[in-house]
């Protein structure tokens, strides 16, 4: 890991935290859709990140969001869950060592299909934990499921758009 | 011992995960106990000032709307001025009125953070303990319901919005004073649930529902909403329906906190009965 990667990740951490708190948390489409782009940070941590650092940094990121939304533990629990699932997800969807080119998971290095599966799985894990924990009621199971699916789709869209915006494919 | 140590080292990822997850869940589920703690008020005053700063900017975008609300309020107040009344007698006297006594006063406050997109929504307002705000005070906008204060720091208050799974407001039909309960089931932030409507009441679309004044939080007659649709339940004892909130929770700029001057007396009365 070069010092440039470290710096990039710190900047990304701070930027996504404030972008989420100040702008995305105010977005509300038809009462169901609420994007959580801040988990893009966890998606983009380098492959060589030590596993303990993966968990700890996700925990701190989640707590940071919770600090502003006054829901201590809610986002932290979802982020830790997602970070825990990340190494397993990578193992499952990678066919061989050749798919782990480059240090950072990206659309450019791993290809569209790999990155799409990778994002979908992790976003779904994060969003389901978050929404079901927030409600904690069995009676609203299906309306919550709808919220999970719609919000996940919207977050996925934002992740993909950012991927094309900030890391465009070389021609 | 060495083996145990090696075991922990080998599987540290799982243990660290469990540790962090349990820690987060502990924080989450003991959230209510934390509300009064120093950690909570520290985070409240820190994030409060960041939110206030951001609100300073976003405030400009709603100036037109704020102006409109202010002008409407001004017109209402103008019509209450002595000059607005027809004077039958040119002399005026000061009468010390013992029949009427002030029961409610209102503290105006600015909303610095608000949400409608979560299952449990809260607002933060820029008035706190030093302005005289206490827990369980009602919050209204104009003559419409907003929520109730659930936590107070020195300069800010945390208000549980009507759009929260723990909000349950005692309301009544304006036309016949029949009591009902109003809740919010998530989803559309304009629609609320009306529960426990007695069977014998004839409900019509557009019936107005106001606060009942039974709860010590809101005075009587604050607007909650109008009935939009309802179901006549066959097997249950009560009918239920949905209402359209009078408040547009997504565009709340300034609110008023209801101070019940006689609350202490009411509580003492209740407690004296309990201790007997």
Image (spheres, rainbow, N blue to C red):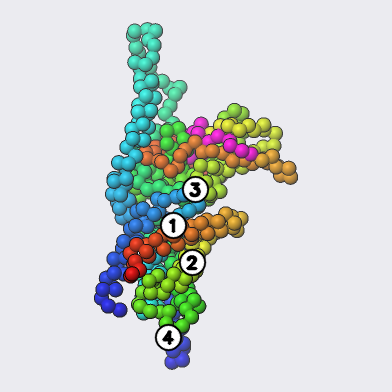
Q: Which of the two discs, 2 and 3, labels the residue nearer the N terminus? A: 3
Element under disc 1: loop
Q: Quadrant of residue B182?
A: top right
Q: Residues within 10 Å of mark 4 (few under 14, many from 20)?
A: few
Q: Which of the two discs, 1 and 3, labels the residue nearer the N terminus? A: 3
Q: Position of residue B25 (x, y in %)?
A: 47, 65
Q: Chain of mark 4?
A: B
Element under disc 3: loop
Q: Residue at x 37, y 64 (%)?
A: A164
Closer to us: mark 4 or mark 3?
Answer: 3
Q: Residue at x 47, y 65 (%)?
A: A123
Q: CA distance from mark 1 to mark 3?
A: 13 Å
Residue bounds of the magenta highlight: B215-230
The reply to whether dot 4 and dot 1 touch (C-beta < 8 Å) is no
Q: CA distance from mark 2 to mark 1?
A: 14 Å
Q: Which residue is mark 4?
A: B9
Q: Which residue is mark 2?
A: A120
Numbered tag placed on residue A35 in the rendering: 1
Q: Is residue B1 left or right of residue A12?
A: right
Q: Which of the two discs, 2 and 1, labels the residue nearer the N terminus? A: 1
């Amino acid at each position: 890991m070069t010092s440039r990667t470290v710096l990039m990740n710190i900047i990304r951490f701070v930027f996504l935290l404030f972008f989420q708190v100040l702008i995305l948390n105010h977005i509300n489409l038809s009462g169901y859709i609420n994007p959580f782009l801040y988990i893009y940070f966890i998606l983009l941590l380098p492959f060589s990140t030590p596993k303990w650092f993966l968990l700890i940094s996700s925990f701190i990121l989640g707590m940071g969001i919770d600090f502003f939304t006054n829901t201590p533990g809610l986002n932290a629990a979802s982020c830790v869950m997602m970070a825990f699932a990340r190494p397993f997800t990578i193992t499952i969807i990678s066919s061989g060592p050749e798919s782990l080119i480059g240090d950072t998971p990206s659309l450019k290095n791993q290809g569209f299909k790999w990155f799409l599966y990778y994002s979908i799985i992790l976003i779904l894990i994060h969003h389901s934990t978050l929404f079901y924990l927030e409600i904690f009621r069995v009676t609203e199971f299906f309306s919550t499921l709808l919220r999970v699916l719609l919000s996940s789709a919207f977050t996925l869209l934002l992740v993909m758009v950012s991927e094309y915006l900030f890391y465009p494919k070389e021609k | 011992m060495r083996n145990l140590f090696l075991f922990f080292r080998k599987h540290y990822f799982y243990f660290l995960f469990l540790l962090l997850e349990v820690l987060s869940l502990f924080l989450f589920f003991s959230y209510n106990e934390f509300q009064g703690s120093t950690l909570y008020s520290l985070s409240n005053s820190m994030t409060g000032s960041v939110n206030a700063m951001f609100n300073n900017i976003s405030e400009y975008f709603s100036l037109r709307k704020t102006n409109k609300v202010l002008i409407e309020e001004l017109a209402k107040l103008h019509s209450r001025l002595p000059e607005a009344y027809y004077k039958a007698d040119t002399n005026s006297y000061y009468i010390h009125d013992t029949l009427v006594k002030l029961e409610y006063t209102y503290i105006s406050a600015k909303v610095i953070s608000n949400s409608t997109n979560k299952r449990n929504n809260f607002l933060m307002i820029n008035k706190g303990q030093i302005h005289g705000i206490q827990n369980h005070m009602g919050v209204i906008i104009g003559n419409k319901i907003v929520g109730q204060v659930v936590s107070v720091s020195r300069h800010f208050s945390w208000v549980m919005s009507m759009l929260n799974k723990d909000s349950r407001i005692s309301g009544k039909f304006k036309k016949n004073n029949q009591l009902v309960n109003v809740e919010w089931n998530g989803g559309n932030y304009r629609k609320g649930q009306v529960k426990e409507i007695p069977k014998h009441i004839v409900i019509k679309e557009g019936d107005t529902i106001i606060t009942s004044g039974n709860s010590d939080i809101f005075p009587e007659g604050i607007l909650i909403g109008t009935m939009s649709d309802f179901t006549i339940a066959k097997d249950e004892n009560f009918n239920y329906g949905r209402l359209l909130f009078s408040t547009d929770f997504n565009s709340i700029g300034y609110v008023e906190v209801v101070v019940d001057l006689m609350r202490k007396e009411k509580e003492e009365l209740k407690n004296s009965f309990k201790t007997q």
